[in-house]
Image: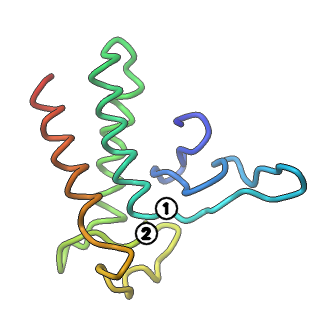
Amino acid sequence: MLRIAWDPDHGGFHSAGSSFGPTHMDDIVIYVRDKTWWVQADAMSLLFAMARLRPADEKYLSTSCAFGKYVKKYLIDAKHGGWFSAGLDTNPEARKRAKATLWKDCKHETEALLDCLLLLDSF
């Protein structure tokens, strides 16, 4: 996950494909540059879980900290609360989109933040 999908320039995870660019499979290009909210929320939980399960491998904890900065800078709406539907680094127009739709509610980010609190408490 870290080697393939992590964006080394801005942080966050691309929704599909590699951070190195498009991946080709059977003449089909697999690459979604967007950093959708649910991918970021699930990645946040996973990173903290890996940091807890593998404390000797410092890359998970350091990436978790960098990821927290990414979420704060590009996903959290500091003015009105909630998470944007995608990271503003890849989707600046997400600032204008609704934060709740038929497909987006606060379930993913709430669960991720609660998971992280529990995991941090266990360190």
Viewer-closest of 46 and 91: 46
Residue lying at the far left of the rendered structure: 121
Cβ–Cβ under 8 Å for marks 2 and 1: yes
Res 35 label = 1
Viewer-closest of 100 and 120: 100
Amino acid type of the residue tagged 2 in the rendering: Ala
Residue drawn at (34%, 53%) of the image: 41
Report which residue position mark 2 lands on: 86
**Relative to 123, residue 14 above or below:** below
Residue drawn at (53%, 37%) of the image: 1
How busy is the neighbourhood of tag 2: few (under 14 within 10 Å), some, or many (20 plus)?
A: many
Amino acid type of the residue tagged 1 in the rendering: Lys
In percent of width and height, residue 88 lies at 43, 71
Q: Give the spatial CA distance, label 2 vs label 1.
A: 5 Å
- Left or right relative to 105: residue 119: left
Residue drawn at (20%, 50%) of the image: 113
